Image (cartoon, rainbow, N blue to C red):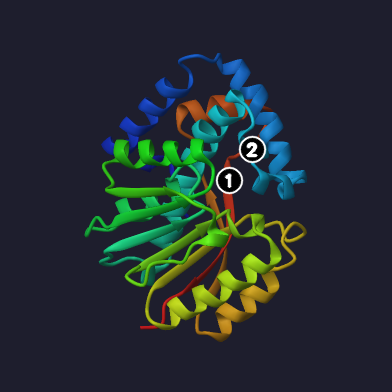
Amino acid sequence: METLDKEVGDPALAGWLSALETRHLANLRPVEVARALRALSSAYVERRDRLGHGAALDGAGKRAAFALFYGPLHFLLIRAIVRAIPAAEGPLDLVVDLGCGTGVAGAAWAVECASRPRVLGLERHPWAADEARWTCRTLGVAADVRCVDIARMRVPPRASAIIAAFTVNELADATRAQLLRELLAFGSRGTRVLVVEPIAKSNAPWWAGWQGAFVQAGGREDQWRFPADLPAVVGRLDHAAGLDHRELTARSLYLANR
């Protein structure tokens, strides 16, 4: 299996990583970001129910850790998943990124497409929305990022791809159920739909129902493990925070009935 470190040799990605480090270490020491990363990692593993209420972004240190550490990890992970699902590649016009965070998931899919589609990012946290705009701009991705709650929006019918990465678990049950119906409807019309979440099943009891619905509709469910040599700044933070991301993991649901 290929590792993901070769992606860092991409000039656009390398430039983004360098700019990301400059941006988020301008007023913080690496040790402060590493300390915040430990707290942020604990929230992801033990208290994911708090993330939907902004717990991941409640201080400058956590914001820096979220953008500087998880941003590159998730970018590399999503791009690897898109490459591993042959049907996910090909021409696209508009990628809708639900709960886009710092914008890396939609941007990763967009830069993988020769057609260089636009990204519509939907994110309710103002700081994350601003960061997503910066991410896309720095990576050369045309994007419109809107600060909006997923529960109060509808995906535009012109979407050619929809991604929800590390987002669905943070939704209220009623919102999650409505979103499933919408995603299945889009997938049935040929829109490419990709849902990505951590492998741990204990934190997402809804996953089995979604998996069954996607597979029944003609989609697929996958578990991914990618060996990864981390970008330098990510590796330093990983070590300083006592983490170990030599392997990037996720599970995904994909649907696109053509």
Total count of labels: 2
Q: Is residue 47 above or below residue 236?
A: below
Rendering quarter of residue 59 = top right
Instruction: Give how far apart the Cα atoms at labels 1 and 2 are.
Output: 23 Å
Horizontally, residue 178 falls left or right of residue 113, namely: right
Q: Position of residue 72 (x, y in %)?
A: 46, 39
Q: Position of residue 228 (x, y in %)?
A: 51, 43
Nearest-to-viewer mark from 1 and 2: 2
Most distant residue in the front direction:
152
Identified at 44% across, 77% down, the residue is 187
Rendered image: mark on residue 247: 1
Q: Position of residue 54 (x, y in %)?
A: 64, 41
What residue is shown with label 2? 56
Q: Earlier in the sequence, mark 1 or mark 2?
A: 2
Q: Position of residue 231 (x, y in %)?
A: 45, 32
Horizontally, residue 28 falls left or right of residue 38, namely: left
Identified at 55% across, 13% down, the residue is 29
Residue 46 can be seen, yes or no: yes
Front-lying residue, 103 or 52: 52
Front-lying residue, 251 or 4: 251
Horizontally, residue 75 falls left or right of residue 112, namely: right
Front-lying residue, 111 or 24: 24
Q: Residues within 10 Å of mark 2 (few under 14, many from 20)?
A: many
Q: Is residue 61 above or below residue 86?
A: above
- Amino acid type for the residue under numbered disc 1: Glu
Identified at 45% across, 69% down, the residue is 193
